[in-house]
Image (cartoon, rainbow, N blue to C red):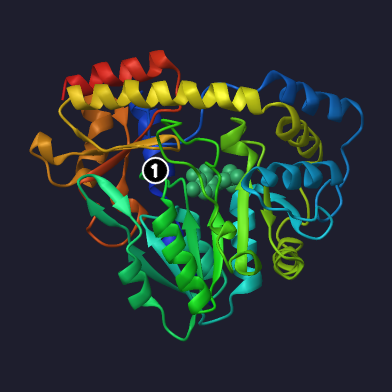
């Protein structure tokens, strides 16, 4: 008999540092700045809309492509970037951005196709590439003076005749980088030249800081030649502080969306009927709440960054997302992973080592801290970090 054990293809993904760190944080009573979810609710009007939808009986399977009012709201929302998608054929509602990314890889890449991931990368990408039977090719971001850039030369060098797709996440988790127009234009040019599909993870599209002088979110799909080769993915979880609802979407040409839908319909088929109604309401009515939340998160970024600096870390610039990275070397420590596993026991704070978002050693000096927490939670973490 063959033992019923996990197949080799998925063995590298059997457990995640996020789950293990959260378990350790719970066991030690630590302040958990490891996992990236907010500890306050999203807009009250959106929560009411979900309750109302349940009371109204929106409790059966929604249509395969998603509820029409949500597809229309997503299409209207994307017009802020000057792009128009037909809600009928060019928008697909998914079980979060995670399912959209997985379905895009399953529907658009084949066995032995190569997919370029830019490290450090969100952990689901590598697992989804493996599920698709494709091969991941990892290219690290370039680092200088505590900032990160797309390494266009290294990406170009990694492209082979088998390269089919590249996954881009901006604003970027874990580094908090919002990639700029020139580097994005360079990546777009490489995609066009080498006929690559771009899968873009834009879940932090509204969480960009330091406006108006700071960065802006520029979707890769808006660059010349990219509309016909980009799967544009986002979701409600980060924008509206409802990470447990898992309502996401993928936009692209009718051909691209049909390919993603073909895979998606056999992953979950559909999900979250009443939440789809509520997220449509939120996209149409709650962007002022999103702006206030963005400003609050920017203040939280500053609060935690100052606290980390006071505690002796080298604090990197975060221009977006829920996260700030800290360099442990000024503390006289070289291995951030080792420190991350000690911190809960030693001082009662949990963070995630950036090294766990890739396989190479380039980011082994960095810890990722989440600042999407209430101020008193951040202050308690800062107090404990100062005792380091
Ligand atoms: C949180 C997160 C996701 C997951 O989004 P869901 O809509 O919850 O599936 C995807 N990508 C990145 C970079 C994230 O941080």
The image quadrant that residue 282 belongs to is top right
Image quadrant for the N terminus? Answer: bottom right
Q: Which residue is mark 1?
A: 20
Question: Residue at the location (33% across, 52% down)?
Answer: 356
Of residues 186 and 150, the one drawn nearer to the viewer in this rendering: 186
Residue at (53%, 74%) from the top-left corner? 192
Q: Residue furthest top?
A: 376
From this viewpoint, is residue 30 visible?
Answer: no
Q: Is residue 136 above or below residue 168?
A: below
Q: Position of residue 341 (x, y in %)?
A: 26, 40
Tell me: residue 332, above or below residue 234: above
- Residue located at (88% from left, 43% from top): 60
Residue reaching furthest left? 332
Q: Position of residue 107 (x, y in %)?
A: 66, 70
Image position of 360 (left or right of 194): left
Residue 171 at x, y percent in the picture? 46, 45
- Horizontal relation, residue 291 to residue 212: left or right: right
- Residue 55 is at least partly visible in this image: yes
Query: Which quadrant of the figure contains the C terminus?
Result: top left
From this viewpoint, which residue is outermost toward the right?
57
Nearer to me, 340 or 320: 320
Labels in figure, total: 1
Mark 1 element type = helix
Percent position (x, y) of residue 194? 49, 79
Category of crowding for the residue at label 1, using alpha-carbon neighbours closer than 10 angstroms: few (below 14), some (14–19), many (at least 20): few
Residue shown at 62%/61% (left/top)? Answer: 231
Whether disc 1's CB lies below 8 Å from ligand 1 is answered no
């Amino acid at each position: 008999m063959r033992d019923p054990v996990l197949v080799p293809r998925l063995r590298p993904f059997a457990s995640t540092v996020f789950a293990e760190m959260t378990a350790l944080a719970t066991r030690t009573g630590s302040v958990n700045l490891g996992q990236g979810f907010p500890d306050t609710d999203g807009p009250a009007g959106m929560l009411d809309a979900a309750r109302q939808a349940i009371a109204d009986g929106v409790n059966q399977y929604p249509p395969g492509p998603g509820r029409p009012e949500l597809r229309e709201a997503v299409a209207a929302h994307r017009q802020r970037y000057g792009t128009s998608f037909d809600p009928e054929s060019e928008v697909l509602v998914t079980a979060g951005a995670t399912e959209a990314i997985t379905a895009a890889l399953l529907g658009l890449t084949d066995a032995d196709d190569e997919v370029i991931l830019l490290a450090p990368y969100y952990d689901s990408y590598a697992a989804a590439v493996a599920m698709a039977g494709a091969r991941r090719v990892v290219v690290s971001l370039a680092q200088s003076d505590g900032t990160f850039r797309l390494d266009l030369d290294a990406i170009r060098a990694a492209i082979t005749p088998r390269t089919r797709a590249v996954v881009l996440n901006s604003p970027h988790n874990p580094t908090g980088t919002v990639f700029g127009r020139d580097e994005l234009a360079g990546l777009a040019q490489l995609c066009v030249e080498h006929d690559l599909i771009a899968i873009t993870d834009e879940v932090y599209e509204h969480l960009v800081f330091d406006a108006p002088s700071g960065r802006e979110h520029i979707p890769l799909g808006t660059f010349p030649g990219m509309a016909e080769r980009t799967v544009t993915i986002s979701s409600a979880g980060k924008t509206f502080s409802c990470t447990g609802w898992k309502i996401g979407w993928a936009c692209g040409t009718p051909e691209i969306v049909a390919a993603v839908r073909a895979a998606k319909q056999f992953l979950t088929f559909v999900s979250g009927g009443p939440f789809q109604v509520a997220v449509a309401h939120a996209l149409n009515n709650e962007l002022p709440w999103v702006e206030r939340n963005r400003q609050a998160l920017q203040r939280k970024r500053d609060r935690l960054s100052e606290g980390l600096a006071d505690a002796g870390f080298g604090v990197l610039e975060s221009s977006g997302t829920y996260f700030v990275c800290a360099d442990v070397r000024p503390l006289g420590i070289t291995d951030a992973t080792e420190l991350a596993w000690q911190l809960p026991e030693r001082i009662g704070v949990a963070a995630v080592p950036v090294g766990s978002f890739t396989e190479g050693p380039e980011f082994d000096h960095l810890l990722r801290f989440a600042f999407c927490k209430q101020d008193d939670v951040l202050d308690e973490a800062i107090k404990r970090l100062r005792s380091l």
